[in-house]
Amino acid sequence: MELAKKYNPADAEKKWYSHWLDKGYFHSTPDKRESYTIVIPPPNVTGVLHMGHMLNNTLQDVMIRRARMMGYNACWVPGTDHASIATEAKVVAKLSDDGIKKSDLTREEFLSHAFHWKDKHGNIILEQLKKLGASCDWERTKFTMDEDLSKSVISVFIDLYEKGHIYRGIRMVNWDPEGKTALADDEVIYREVDSQLYYIKYKIKETNDSLTIATTRPETLLGDTAVCINPNDNRFKKYKGKKKLIGICLGYQQILFNEKGKIIQQKNIYHGYQSIVRVTKESKLFKKDKNFKVGRYHSLKLFEPFKSNNIKISMRCAKTGIPMGIEDLKNNIYGFQFHPESFLTENGNTIIKKILSA
């Protein structure tokens, strides 16, 4: 047999990868050995692999091959992700090219087109992984919309909902006007554009002064309710305290952080959770020992001891004793580690009105 003058990696790779697959070297069956499992972060079926996939999967391949050599029962589970909104956009575009409107299709008909797209592009991605030499257990290939996985997702969602970890809320979202649906942050494709920088003068109430704000979003003027200043900037010190500042949840934490307070994780998560908070003797606005039932959406707290010349702990959780409210009467600053605006907070309007009327 005459050897080639130049080494052709494609020939060797195809030969030996086929040999590995035929011998079942990548397949794993549970036994007495200690297991070592990696579930591949499934690539979206909306296209082909990029260099990021190549790097990530190479690192996984190194780890799983090392585990096999060390005697572990190593299993690398491959698969693809349906990436619903991104895939839907691709499918709708393809249908449009074929003269078909999504609105003219039933749900089942559209899903049929979507799965056809998945079968075509999902296989391209899996074949690319094989070309890379990925030592996956291909007999275990999964798709995120497989029936058993879909049932698991629904089961976990219901369980989390019943435990109070999933709740409805009013939030700013990314909106797709074409698909008429909300988008996750990682589903938004950003691009840089040339824009104008606008300078807007804000008149300061009860004075002849004004502050000039630079912005690329002048349309937000209609919704603006306050201007934040740097209290340490000599130009603006005279405006400090002109209005009351109320920090809610993250705002509360930011106020404490600026006062050298340390914000730490709690043992429990309180999302969509009601607690009783009790007014402390430090409060100058609320009657001592008065209780409020409040809504919580957080899992952080102020680490104590905490010292501040002006900020006082005005409320604490009746059960755990952690700080839940602060007052700084000197600088008109107030904060809550709960949401007075939430429907879960009873008499939330009373709390806000009390501060505004002080």
Image: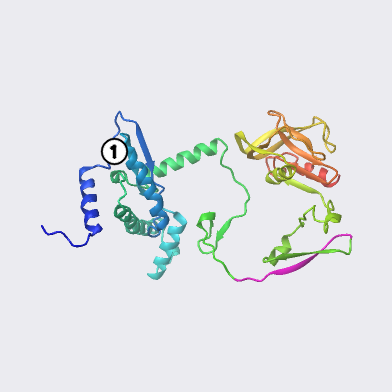
Q: Which residue is outermost to the left?
A: 1
Q: Which residue is mark 1?
A: 28
Query: Magenta stretch: residue 229 in it?
Result: no
Total residue callouts: 1
The residue drawn where x is 40% and y is 52% is 55
Instruction: Quadrant for residue 28, please give it.
Output: top left
Instruction: Quadrant for residue 351, please give it.
Output: top right
Question: Is 59 left or right of 349, judged from the image as shown?
Answer: left
Q: Is residue 43 visible?
A: no
Colour pattern: rainbow
> In which quadrant of the rendered image does the C terminus lie?
top right
- Pick the front one: 222 or 315: 315
Please tell me whether mark 1 sits on a helix, a strand or a loop. loop
The residue drawn where x is 83% and y is 33% is 287
Note whether 129 is above or below 157 in the view shown: below
- Pick the front one: 187 or 259: 259
Question: Is 236 left or right of 151, judged from the image as shown?
Answer: right
Query: Looking at the picture, how far across and down is residue 201, in whole percent?
Result: 79, 66
Q: Is residue 88 visible?
A: yes
Q: Amino acid at mark 1?
A: Ser
> In which quadrant of the rendered image does the N terminus lie?
bottom left
Question: Is 206 left or right of 199, judged from the image as shown?
Answer: right
- Pick the front one: 172 or 30: 30
Query: Looking at the picture, how far across and down is residue 260, in whole percent?
Result: 73, 41
> What span is in magenta?
194-206
Question: Is 88 left or right of 355, judged from the image as shown?
Answer: left
Query: Looking at the picture, how far across and down is residue 41, in whole percent?
Result: 41, 48
Query: Magenta stretch: residue 201 in it?
Result: yes
Query: Looking at the picture, how far across and down is residue 345, in whole percent?
Result: 70, 40
The residue drawn where x is 84% and y is 38% is 285
Label 1: how many Cα within 10 Å (few below 14, some 14–19, many 20+): some
